[in-house]
Each structure stands twice: as C-alpha cells, then as structure tokens.
Amino acid sequence: MNKNKTKITAVAALMTLAFAGVSCVNEKHDDKAASTEETAKTSTPKSDLPYDLANPVKYNMPQNLFEISGIVFHKGDPSRVFAIQDEDGDLFYLGLEDKESKFTKFGGKGDYEDLAIINDQIIVLKSNGELHTFPISEINKPEVANVVKTKDLVPKAEYEGLAADEKAGMVYVLTKEVKKGKKDETEIFAFKFDGGKFTPSGTFALSYKEIADLAGESKMKFRPSALAKNPSTGEWYVLSSMNKLLVVTDADFKIKGTYPLKGGAFNQPEGIAFDRDNNLYISNEGGTLAAGNILMFKVKK
C-alpha cells in the first residue's frame, strides 16, 4: 500500500513538472510574439499606395520627345502637359493624345533634367544644379526673351529632380549623385521662391540603407531622377530610373514605403507629376522598339 502511494506521488510530481515546463515554453512564446507585435507597431509604417502600377493608361509621345525627361502640369490641369528632353533647351507642351507637340526655345544645348511651375513661372533644372526661370506667358513666342539663370544655389553634384509646392511657395532640388563627400544618402534642398528669388529653407536626406532595407535589397545605390508631391496626401513620390523604383515619403521626407516599377512600359522612368484629380503620371524615355511615353495611373476610388 505504501509502495502504491509512493508511485502515485512520483507520477503526480512528474506531471506537475511537465505542466510547468509547457507553461514556461508557452510564456516564452507569448513574450516573443508580444515583442514581435510591438516591433511591428513601432516600425515605420508602409504607405498604402492608391495606384495600380501594373495597369497604366499609356500615351506615346511624338518623335521630338523620344528622350522625354521631366513633366509637369500648370495648376494640375491635365489637358496640357509641359515637358523637356535632356539635350536641347526647348520647352514642349501638348495634350496627352496629341500627335505633335509645340515648343519654345529657352536655352542652347545642355543636359536639362526636370522642370516645375510656380507662381506662373517655369523653372528648368540642368544636371549641374543651374536653374533657368522664365514666365509661362513666354511660351507664346518662338523663343523666350529673358531667361534668368541661377547658379551656385546648390553644392557641386549631379541633379535630376525638381519640384514645386505652390501652396507653400517652395521649390525642391533633388540630388541624383554626390561627387564628393556623403555617399550614403540623397539630399533634397528646399528653397522659398518669392519674386523670382530662391531663399534656402532647409535640407532633407533619403538614406540609401533605409531604402534598400525596405526594398529587400542587400545593397542599393539609389540614384533618383524625379520627385513630385501628392496634392491629396502631402506625401512625396520620389522616382529612380536606375533602380526602377518608386519611394514614398511623408511631407518631411521620412521614408514610408518602396514600390518596384515592373513591366515593359517602364523603359526609363525619368519624370513624375500629379494632376488636380490626384492621378499619377510617370514619363519614360524611348528605347530601341518603343517611343517615349507618359503613363497615367488613376487614383483608386
């Protein structure tokens, strides 16, 4: 009888230890799950992109915009797009379905990368950071009479992106590649634009490592080609032709998400813009078997 009691006591003790062990494992598992959940809550939230990048409306450009670069709309009006191509100092303008484009000469041969419109002034960016400014009313002439050139506004580097926030009266110049100094981030230089003058108003940066991590790449030399501000959300959309990548940030250029540009339509994405209805547009240089184009992505309802 005593032996049986001893056996029962031993079995009970083993069961108690086993239960305690399972409880401990579950507790550790719960702690790990809670930790993972907390990390997810504190990590940078990814932007919920309101555009289907796989299904654009495609507009082929005329031959003189085979190498289309920057694009912009005047006050968001999609009935006429303004564009440049990166070899000649000509400002082009046309309807998206037009077979021919009109143009006005504003400069000589050069590497022109992007353009913006603010306060009825057109600003064109050269790759060396030089800005060419003239009134939009000058497009009614074959050649612009008085172009104001602004030099040495930004450090020596290669520049491809220019954008304006007309409501805030701000102009932003985006670095493509820094020749000297920092190599781990892209800089954006902000300027207050008033009376034709550019007043420095801060500098922002986009971390290569942060972009690479979000894109799932071990290494990435981010070389952006254009940027535009979503008028509805206040987010910045930064386009990279070399990486075929779209990066979305908040209003202060804090990175929220990255989106690959897949498919044959994205031959060489060089320009980006929004219209007043918040539709997204991306321009592409032409290729061996393709004309230059502008892709429209309708905002999801």
Image (cartoon, helix red, strand yellow):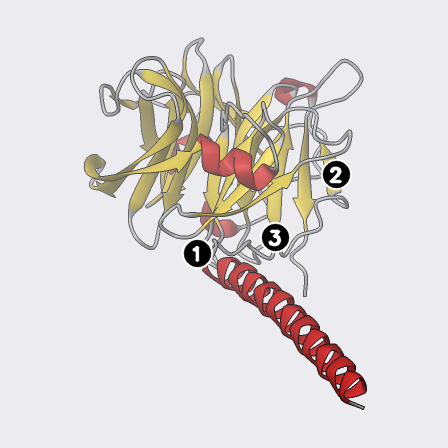
Return the residue nearer the eye: 126 or 179.
Answer: 179
Task: Using the numbered discs, state the Cα–Cα distance from disc 3 to disc 1 in whole angstroms.
Answer: 14 Å
Which residue is identified by label 1?
A: 234
Give the position of the C terminus as an image quadrant: bottom right
Q: Secondary structure at mark 3?
A: loop
Q: Position of residue 199 (x, y in %)?
A: 18, 37
Identified by mark 2, the residue type is Lys
Which residue is identified by label 2?
A: 58
**203 is higher (above) or lower (below) than 154:** below
Judge from the rendering whether residue 145 lies leftward or rightward of residue 245; answer left or right.
left
The image's mark for residue 299 is none
The image's mark for residue 279 is 3
Task: Using the numbered discs, state the Cα–Cα distance from disc 2 to disc 1 in whole angstroms.
Answer: 26 Å
Judge from the rendering whether residue 17 lies leftward or rightward of residue 207; answer left or right.
right
Return the residue nearer the eye: 41 or 150.
Answer: 41
Identified by mark 1, the residue type is Gly
